Structures are given as structure tokens and as C-alpha cells.
Amino acid sequence: MKNISSQPFVLGIDVGATNIKFGLVDSRGKIVATSNLATASFLSHKRTLIQGLLQGCLALLKKHHLEEKDILGVGMGLPGLVDGIRGIVRFLPNIPGWKDVPLKEIMERRLRIPTFLDNDVNLITLAEWKFGAGKGIRNMVCLTLGTGVGSGLILDNRLYRGEGFAAGELGHVPLNEKGPVCNCGGRACLERYVGNRYLQKEAARIFKNKNLSLEDIDRLASQGDQRAKRFWAEAARHIGCGLVGVVNLLNPRRIVIGGGISNAYRHLFPAIRETLKKRAMRTPAQMVKIVRAKLGPRAGVLGAYVLVNHAHCG
Amino acid sequence: MKNISSQPFVLGIDVGATNIKFGLVDSRGKIVATSNLATASFLSHKRTLIQGLLQGCLALLKKHHLEEKDILGVGMGLPGLVDGIRGIVRFLPNIPGWKDVPLKEIMERRLRIPTFLDNDVNLITLAEWKFGAGKGIRNMVCLTLGTGVGSGLILDNRLYRGEGFAAGELGHVPLNEKGPVCNCGGRACLERYVGNRYLQKEAARIFKNKNLSLEDIDRLASQGDQRAKRFWAEAARHIGCGLVGVVNLLNPRRIVIGGGISNAYRHLFPAIRETLKKRAMRTPAQMVKIVRAKLGPRAGVLGAYVLVNHAHCG
């Protein structure tokens, strides 16, 4: 592999709630090798997870006969609040025990490779912007729809992280002044309407069937089932209402939508566009395009590549 | 004046619905002379307003014995959609006949002074950031509360204008999925709840008195009137709900609030802060500070100074 790929490589790590994905990306942005670990096996203690991260890196390097000097940097996306400047993981809501962990320092001490951290959705955003559905776009919002609903913001050709690395929580923009309490402590947040868990509850209620997956409902809608069609139209209206505020506030050129339920784009996107056309201000509504994310599960590792390269280019 | 002030000057113009303010700002950012024209006398035709703008400039220069070479640039804030790169006024919602007017070119041809245009709220934002309540702040939102509700965004130490110069419409972030139709065509926008016109209607309803001004209600609240206190608490809750989304999305360090009803800050700000504390996410809520704008009616002209100086410094 060393002979056919451009060196040096970036070692990208995408820490998710289910899997930890490792990937080697060559200097042209091509993923040339990957490996996976199940996150569940490392949840007993934060030290266990750190061991897993280190061993995953070392195993991948060893397998491909690579040494430190072959690696430009390690880039890592984590599902939570990450201080990318100091390299400290502030807080991971779904991985117990992680609070103010100086992960950059820990990784660098052991691997002797410069390491860069960021929030996982920020890495997806960087990847879609450089290689995917937001290529060449100056102002874009990347919305990820899953159990959590998150987003990343590219504003004036830069990833905007906010004062304390907490920007982009589009899932916690409230849709209503009154409404159900959200995990975050707020009320009526977008995630509280279209996070997978809530969509599944809603589906169970409508179809009186707890075993129907969101994929099933996507299929049903494609087959013309009226309840399934209404289910997606309702979800799209909620997403659209959340995006009206974002479009009026940020006037982006593009909104890239990814994550599990974005697979139901045939049923979601027309109604999202309709809501924006009807309710957002004319100038920004005319100018924004709603598109599907392109990179799927590769986005995290590719975003790590962009992160490391940006760090090197200043 | 030429002897005591630092040259060159910036000539700032703040075009408002009521007044057109002209101001000479010296190189240290001090306003050394001003003049005013009533906007109403120029509304018959866009050419009339352009004549007014030119004559206002020329009169101010003449009065202070200044020539073109004494002026670094003219900066102008306009209440609408302005393409600051091309120097074209796209649309002014409250001044009839203005559509795609190449105002920069027109002014420059006549005055022979480099001229820069921007939206009026953007200029207020630049002024508060450089000289006022947002001094030294990397990420801030400047909210202006009046007949219209607008905002400007300083993100990563730059004014963020959006893809088509339409960013910052915080007044048109919807507070609810269902609700009253707004002027902008949307529904349940923040402005539809706390724009002066709507607040006044609400006041007339509550107090069964059409002649009570918002200043009167501020005074009544200070005197302990319960209805007046509830009136402001309700307005503050709406503003707070709008800001929850902005705080979660942009994680700003500071929110600067100006415009007419911000004078009722004693009754508004505590309830806004309370709403943010209760409903925004913990990290961004802890980090944001809500403060009053400092510059009042001088903000537009001072913002013009910042705009012109930025243009010269790149």
C-alpha cells in the first residue's frame, strides 16, 4: 500500500455511540484502509476507552507497516463537547466518566503523532464541505438527523465553533414556546420532535405497532401508504420550521442533511422545501438549496483528514 | 476644527425611517460634527432621496471647510437589503421605489470620495463591537428592538453577512410552529410578538387605553403596577425564547440589546436571563452575557466609521 498511495497519511478516528471507526487517509483524501471496534466493549471506564483508541491506532499502523513518521497527524471526532484548541474532551453525554480529559496530550504522549480533536458533527461538516454535498460552498449548514439531532456551520468559508465550542446545536433550537421537555433541559426542541427515539414513539402510536422501524415506514410511504406519508410530512414540517429560523438568521447557500432518517429524503425533502418557501423570508429562501449528505459513514474519517490538514495549513 | 481633530475624517450617514443622520468622525473615532434631515421630505422619489444624501454630505463638508481629500471615505447604513460588495441597494422595505440602486457608484461619481454601504443594523453592530457594549468580544449578537426587530452577528471577530447579505434576521426567527402571520410572510416570528406595533396593540388591550406609550408602561412598571410588570415579563419571555435558539446555535459570548424598548431593560433583562438559564443548554447559557447597547443614536455613524476603516485595512 505504501507504494501506491500518497504519503503522508492521516489517521482518522470517529468515535460513535455504536462503533469506533479508524481510517487511514492518503494525502489526496482517499481512505486506503479502515478498521472498527464496538464502542460497547470499552464503556466500563474512560481508561478502557483510551486504551481501545490507542490500540486501534497501533494495530492499524502495524498491519500496514507504517511508522510515526508516515503519519501527518491523528484526527479524532467525539460525540460531545470538545475543546479543540486545548485538546481536551469536556464532556461526552453518552459515554460515562468523560469530563475534562486531556485526550490530545494522552494520545500524543503514547503515539508520538500530532493529534487533533473536534466534535463528531463538526468533522462530518468539514468532510461534506471539502469532499461532499457542500463542496465549494461559502456558507452552509450540515444537519445530522439521528438519535441526536446536531449540526455544523460553515460560515464565510470557515467552520464556526462558537465561543466555547458549543455552537451548532440546531437540534436544540426550540420550535415552540410551550411544549415537551427535552433531554437538554429545554422545551420543544427540534430533537424532541424528530430525534429517532421520538419519531419511533410517534410511529408506534400511529401504526399501533412497536416493531415498525423508520426504514419500514420509509418503504410504506414509497408504496403509497397514507399514514406513512403523513408521518414523514409531519416530521418534515418540524424540520422545516426549525430551518426557517436558521435560514433567516444565517442566510446559508446550502443545507446538507445527513444521518439515518435522511434516507427517507424522498418523503422528507419536498415538504421541508415547501415549508421554507412558505415561511422563510424571500431572499434567503430563494437562495438556499436543501441537499442530501453524500459521504455517509465515511464522513467522520474524511473530516478528520480535513481537520489535520487545516491544522497544518493554519 | 481641522486643527484640533485627527484627519482624515469619515463621513457617516445613517438613513433611518424618521431621520437621516450625517456625522463627521475623526481618525480616533470621535464624532466631531453632525447634521440631520427629516427622511419624510425625501420620500417622493428615490432620486429625491439621493439628492438629499448628496446635498447633506456637501453641506456638512462646506460648513466645516473640508474637501474631498480630507475624507477617508463615506460610510452609509440603509434600512434594508444592501449588497456591500457591489455597493448596490437591493431593496428598502419602508422607502418606496428602491430596488437595485447602484448607490455607491452614484455617490462616488458626485462626491469623488470612496463610499461604502451596509445594512443599518450591521453598522450598529460594528459600532457596539468596536466602541460599545461588545468591545473585545469575539462572538456577539446585537439585537435591535424597534418597529422592526433586527440583529447583527459578529462571529469569530468578523461581521457575518450571509450568502446574500440577508443574515441576521433574528426578528424573523419563528417562536412557534403555529401563530399569527408576520409581515415577512412567515408565521409567529419574534417581531410579530415584540415589534413596537404589536407591543402597543397588546398594551392597548391590557390597559384598555390606546394612548399609553411603551415609555408610560416602563414607568408604570417601575412604580410597581402589576399589569405593567406582567406586560414586560411576557415580552421578555418571547425575546428569551427567541434567544434560546440563537444561544444554542451560535454559542455567543455576549448579546447586546438596543433599540427603543431596551430602555425598559430593568423590567426586560432579568426575565430574558431567567428564560435563557431555564431553557438554553447549560454550556452556552452559562457563558453568554446579556447587556444593554451603549451607543444609542450615535451607533449608526460610528458604525460607518468602522466600515470605512475595515475597507481600508482589508
Image (cartoon, coloured by chain):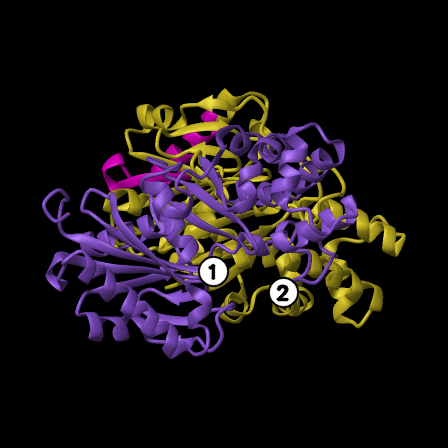
Chain colours: A yellow, B purple
Numbered tag placed on residue B18 in the rendering? 1
**Residue span colored magenta:** A50-76
Q: Earlier in the sequence, mark 1 or mark 2?
A: 1
Q: Residues within 10 Å of mark 2 (few under 14, many from 20)?
A: few
Amino acid at pointer 1: Thr
How far across and down, in percent of the image, does residue B92 sit? 47, 69
Whether residue B37 is in magenta: the answer is no
Left or right of B254? Residue A242 is right
Pointer 1 chain: B
Left or right of A275? Residue A226 is right
Q: Secondary structure at mark 1?
A: loop
Q: Which residue is mark 2?
A: B183
- Nearest the viewer among B55 and B89 is B55
Pointer 2 chain: B
Amino acid at pointer 2: Asn
When asked about the image quadrant of residue A238, the answer is bottom right
